[in-house]
Amino acid sequence: MINGIWLGMILIGFVFAAVNGRMDAFTAAVFDGAKSGVTVSFGLISVLVFWMGLMRVAEDAGLLKKIAKVLGPVVSFLFPDVPKGHPAIGYILSNMSANLLGLGNAATPMGIKAMQELQTLNPDKETATPAMCTLLALNTASITLIPATLIAIRLNYGSSDPAGIVGTTLAATAVATLAAIAADRLCRRLVMLRRPPGPPAARSGDPARGAAPFQQSSLKG
């Protein structure tokens, strides 16, 4: 899908450039974009290597485990349908910790692993579970304490104050995260309201009829 979108944009640009007789500008823009991409990539390498190294030091020192312990109750609240001790919890915590430090490239593999583990709990492999939707929303709008990647880009382009966006980024991502959590809770609530009602409760004087629904609900839980 993404490849098709990019291909469509390139073809549209090519057609408009040909119609307007501006193929020289189109060609120059293509090569300038390629050059800028390589330049920015090299500028990001040093910063990302630095922060990845700090993440490794923090992991060896036990800092990430402490962060995970602090975030544990939050994750339990946000993902009530994921059993405690499930491998998905660990990957979710690692994903959230990396996003807090603005390391999107480091958070992505953990997010993918978390999704794979959540898929093992999914009874319908063709439909995303509420936990998957929650993870996607939080990963997209995660609170960022240190936007390392954006700082690196601003530094690479000669900004006089590369870290000047820390405060605004923190505020923006905090609002986005709160909005994502609110939308997630609302959607979960709507899904619960739309579920068909369960079987009628058995009469209190008939224990045999009351056992089967209880066992069925226990298995589902």
Image: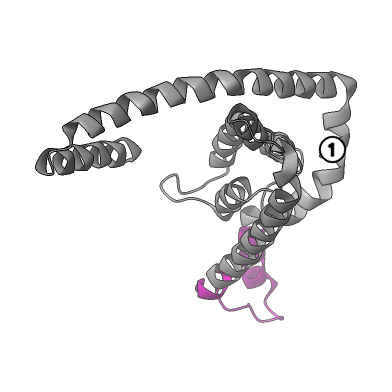
The location of residue 65, given as percent across then percent down, is 85, 31
The location of residue 181, given as percent across then percent down, is 66, 60
Q: Position of 32 compared to 40: left or right?
A: left
Of 109 and 3, nearer the camera is 3
Q: Position of 139 compared to 166: left or right?
A: left
Q: Give the residue pinned by disc 1.
A: 67
Q: Position of 94 compared to 158: left or right?
A: right
Residue at screen point 10% across, 43% down: 19
Magenta residue check for 58: no
Q: Which image quadrant for residue 216?
A: bottom right
The location of residue 160, given as percent across then percent down, is 69, 36
Magenta segment: 192-218
Magenta residue check for 193: yes
Residue at screen point 64% across, 63% down: 179
**Mark 1 Cα-neighbour bin, 10 Å: few <14, some 14–19, many ≥20:** some
Q: Residue flagged by tag 1: what amino acid is it?
A: Ile
Q: Quadrant of the N terminus?
A: top left
Q: Position of 2 compared to 152: left or right?
A: left
